[in-house]
Amino acid sequence: MGSKGALFGVSLGPGNPALITRRAWALLQRDTFWTYPVRTERSESYALGITRAAGLSPPAGHKPLVFPMTHDAEILAKSWMHAAQTVLELLHQGTDVLFLVEGDVSTYSTFSPLARTVAGLDPKVKVETVAGVSSFSAAAALLQTPLADTDDTVAIIPAGYGIETIDHLLDNFDTLVLLKVKPLLDEIIALLERRGLLEHSAFVEKAGAREERVIRDVASLQDTTVNYLSLLLVKNPHRERSDIIRGCRKKKSGVAKA
């Protein structure tokens, strides 16, 4: 058997082609096989759409890999195995494979389980993760607000963790980023209203894409339908700092200058 191909997890940023990194761009110019995640066989790939917005056309070799939207462990394991076997067959032929992902490939991405499954089938396969711009960092830039300022704390979670978890995190972090807010948006808005945080919140949908939406009046989204690729950035200026944080500040202020 000749030399094996390498698997690349390629971050494309949240939607604006200008946010594709130079490393990712260079890989997209090479003679490689493109793969990309879809929910069903008939679904469109958002990641592939970013490359088209950048003026690129898929190479002759490209294939969607289906990752169903489910929490069923058995269904997920089967989809990861099927995708890994598809990729591995190409790698064993000596073909480099790109797995295209919107945002950053290391953040709630389908690339991680794919890479783990491929490595489990063949530990000698080379895998490279190409970092990219995340949706929440792009959103913070659009909003002209820092994710974290000085010694602020930040939590980033899918909203699907539930209202109770979100409520708890608001007590413990200065900035809370809620991803994929569509299913719980009305409940989240109600929570933010109860806590007096609506004016410190902002909604961003498809950051960087042509369809991008930035809504600062979050309450106006009540009883509306938003896109799956949407997030809420919430600041909590009322949060009490923990003793640990206050202690760190004291230590910093007490350092003698040379």
Image: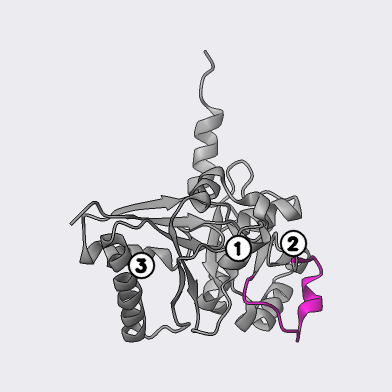
**Mark seen at residue 114:** 3
Question: Where's residue 61, x and y in %?
Answer: 45, 66
**Count of number-bearing discs:** 3
Question: Percent position (x, y) of residue 171?
Answer: 58, 64
Q: Residue at x 56, y 59 (%)?
A: 103
Give the class, few, some or many, for how many residues have Cα within 10 Å of label 2's Cα (few <14, many ≥20). Answer: some
**Where on the picture, by quarter, is residue 155?**
bottom right
Q: Is residue 86 left or right of residue 200?
A: left
Q: Which of marks 2 and 1 is nearer the N terminus?
A: 1
**Which one is closest to the eye, mark 2 or mark 1?**
1
Q: Quadrant of residue 12?
A: bottom right
Magenta-highlighted residues: 212-229
* Viewer-side residue, 183 vs 200: 183
Rendered location of residue 227, percent (x, y): 67, 77
Residue sitting at x 74%, y 66%: 212
The residue indicated by pointer 2 is 200
Q: Which amino acid does label 1 sit on?
A: Val
Nearer to us of marks 2 and 3 is 3
Q: Which residue is drawn at 44% across and 78% down?
A: 67
Asked whether 98 falls inside the magenta stretch, the response is no
